[in-house]
Image (spheres, grey):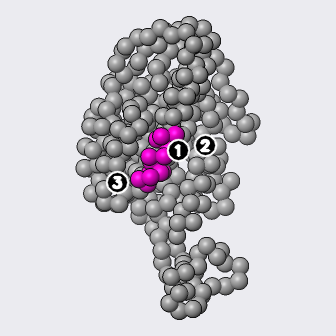
Amino acid sequence: MLGTKPSRVGHATAARFIDPKALARIDNLGLVAKTVVEGFLGGLHRSPYLGLSVDFAEHRAYMPGDDIRRIDWRLFGRTDRFYVKEFEADTNANFSVLLDISRSMDFGYEGITKLDYGRFVAASLLYLSSKQRDRVGLITFDSDIVDFVPPAAKHLDIALHTLERVQSTRAGNLRTTLPKIAEAFRRRSIIALITDCYDDPKAVVGAVNALRQKGNDLIVFHILDPVEITFSYDEAVSFEDLETGERLSVVPDKMRDKYRQMMSEHTKTLSKLMGENPIDYALFDTSTPLDWALFTYLSRRERMSRLRR
């Protein structure tokens, strides 16, 4: 996760999705969010509730053609009759985005920075949740809480304005800041954490676990620049750790395989530990069209939500 600025052509993107670099040229975050969300909503069969906002309502008799996964087998064991579970949308859920704005998020190899991509993710999720009539809020943080917009039905514009003016100025510290943020949540919420997970996986998960109190539903969006995954530098370069300022000269050919292995282990460990807790985990790289990334993630989350009922 060390940063430098050699040039390299990013991954080609599918023509029908929006290149993140094109989004970066749009000045208005509200327009970015609307463009992204309305772009992927058409691909979903119904509104992609983020998970917490769909609650059990009642049973009804099974009818031919019903999804057998909705059969309540415990009730069948007691009554010897087939009933399916009905669900209804709770349109008053609390949804908050926690955006890491620490210095490491200000890295961008070619194209946009992790922070800008994270802002786009945050704006899109807030817009989508507000469209579902949920109360939306935002917290930005580094080594401390920087901005706090409490969840409310009319706070979308305030949250978007806050995202417009974020800047990376300090090093981050998930271990101390996330437990402090957890104290701000007084009722059950959906919480989306957007960060580059710049720490040991066990420390990251330990910090994130502080947010699980009161039954909060957690989603972690792990944002990385493509070169942080592939280490695709061609020439000897000098790296600077954006958190500490420490510099290191490296010959990429001699370190590439070892680096890729370490990064692969890092993301796999994060995914495994998050799944065990359980915390939703999604890895996005900044070259991926955002509408495609969110469409893929929310479709998967919706399917998993139906299977868990």
Q: Is residue 153 visible?
A: no
Local packing at callout 3 (Cα closer than 10 Å; few below 14, some 14-19, many 20+) is many
Label 2–label 1 contact, CB within 8 A: yes
| Left-right relation of 276 to 228 | left
Q: Earlier in the sequence, mark 2 or mark 1?
A: 1
Task: Name the residue rendered at 64%, 43% in the picture.
Answer: 292
| Residue occupied by mark 2 | 293
Q: Secondary structure at mark 3?
A: helix
Q: What are the residue bounds of the magenta stretch?
A: 268-280
In this view, which residue lies farthest toward the right? 15
| Left-right relation of 169 to 229 | left
Q: CA distance from mark 1 to mark 3?
A: 17 Å
Task: Name the residue rendered at 60%, 25% in the picture.
Answer: 230
| Residue occupied by mark 3 | 212
Name the kind of residue labelled 3 in the image. Answer: Arg
Name the kind of residue labelled 1 in the image. Answer: Ala
Q: CA distance from mark 2 to mark 1?
A: 9 Å
Name the kind of residue labelled 2 in the image. Answer: Ala
Q: Is residue 278 magenta?
A: yes
Task: Name the residue rendered at 52%, 52% in the picture.
Answer: 128
Task: Name the residue rendered at 56%, 60% in the picture.
Answer: 304
Q: Is residue 215 magenta?
A: no
Residue 38, above or below 169 = below
Q: State which mark lies toward you, 2 or 3.
A: 3
| Residue occupied by mark 1 | 282
Whole-percent x, y for residue 76 in the image = 55, 86
Residue 28, above or below 302 = above
Q: Secondary structure at mark 1?
A: strand
